[in-house]
Image (cartoon, rainbow, N blue to C red):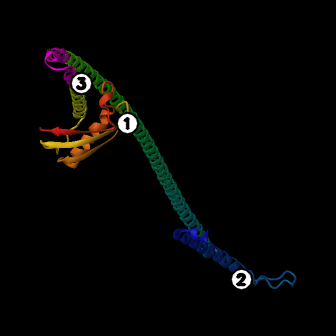
Amino acid sequence: MANMISPQRKQALKDGLQAFGLAVAVHLAFGLLLFIGAWDWPRFDRPDPPVRVTLVDMGPMVEQRRAEEAERQADQERQQQAEQERQRQLEQQRQAEQARREEEQRRQEAERQREIERQREIERRERELAERRAEQERREAEAQRQAELERQRRREEERQRIEQERREAEQAQQRELEELRRQREEAQRRREEEERRLAELAERRAAEDAERQAREEAERLRLAAEQAAADARRATLREEYISTIRELVRRNWNRPPTTRPGVMCRVRVVQIPGGEIIAAEIVRPCNADEATRRSIVSAVMRVGELPYRGYESVFAREIDFDFRFDG
């Protein structure tokens, strides 16, 4: 607390103590004068001495005491006024200090409120940022989900398209096989008609020759004619069979960009009864590049099944045929 007393307050206290000491000294001096003045008075227990009267003029002393008393009162009044002034100044200082402290408190409170507002603003921004981040993540997740759904839809459409193309290819192949069967039946009918005419002609010739030749020669000629007809039919049917296979392979062939006109490759096909293809390979001679060779083998395997009904007589497990491409 002593450290909190201002210099003005200390000076005021010091002046007050000095004034108090001066007043005490004045009163002591006045009392001493009275005591000295009464020192020579006769004692009552002695015999009365001769009466001697000494008149003393007390006027100056009384005036001096009055002046001193007036001066003392004036000093007290000045000290009181000084003390009141000091008290007023101290009160003003206290009020100023109180106002300063209140202002400081208001400033600190305002600063604290601003800090609270800043913290609230930071928290609000962090919440907004977190909300925006969560919203962005939700949108990205939704976009990824939609993209995945779109990919699944496209894959399903692609699968359906491939399935539809496969069905259409199978249907087209079936139509081609039916057309080939129809053409084969028509060719068979024409061959039978031709054979019938040839037989009739042979019979007529045999009848004419029978008149000129002996029976043994006629029988030999008839047998030779029949054998020749059978061989011709077999050769024609095998050639038709090979041509049918070659045409099926050509239709299923996807020509690579590297293929040049003039390709000629011998192809060997391995099948089982019923026409199902189980293997295919290129055998010599073949002047095609590797990509063309692979494409020819792939075309054979895409055929899947060779014609069988109607070609039982010329069926073979391994069939070689020449694949040509002239551009």
Q: Earlier in the sequence, mark 1 or mark 3?
A: 1
Looking at the picture, does residue 54 appear above or below residue 227?
below
Is residue 57 visible in the rendered structure shown here? Answer: no
| Amino acid at circle 1 | Ala
**Quarter of the figure that contains the N terminus:** bottom right
Q: Which residue is label 2 attached to?
A: 36
SS assignment at label 2: helix
- Residue 30 is one of the magenta-drawn residues: no
- Percent across and percent down for residue 157 are 35, 29
- Percent across and percent down for residue 115 are 47, 52
Q: Nearer the viewer, residue 166 or 282?
A: 282
Q: Nearer the viewer, residue 107 or 127?
A: 127
In the image, the segment drawn in magenta is 198-227
Residue 223, label in figure: 3
- Residue 226 is one of the magenta-drawn residues: yes
SS assignment at label 3: helix
Which residue appears farthest toward the front when viewing the image? 214
Q: Earlier in the sequence, mark 1 or mark 2?
A: 2
Query: Which marked residue is nearer to the observer: mark 1 or mark 2?
Result: 1
Label 2 Cα neighbours within 10 Å, binned few <14 / some 14-19 / many ≥20: few
Residue 69 figure quarter:
bottom right
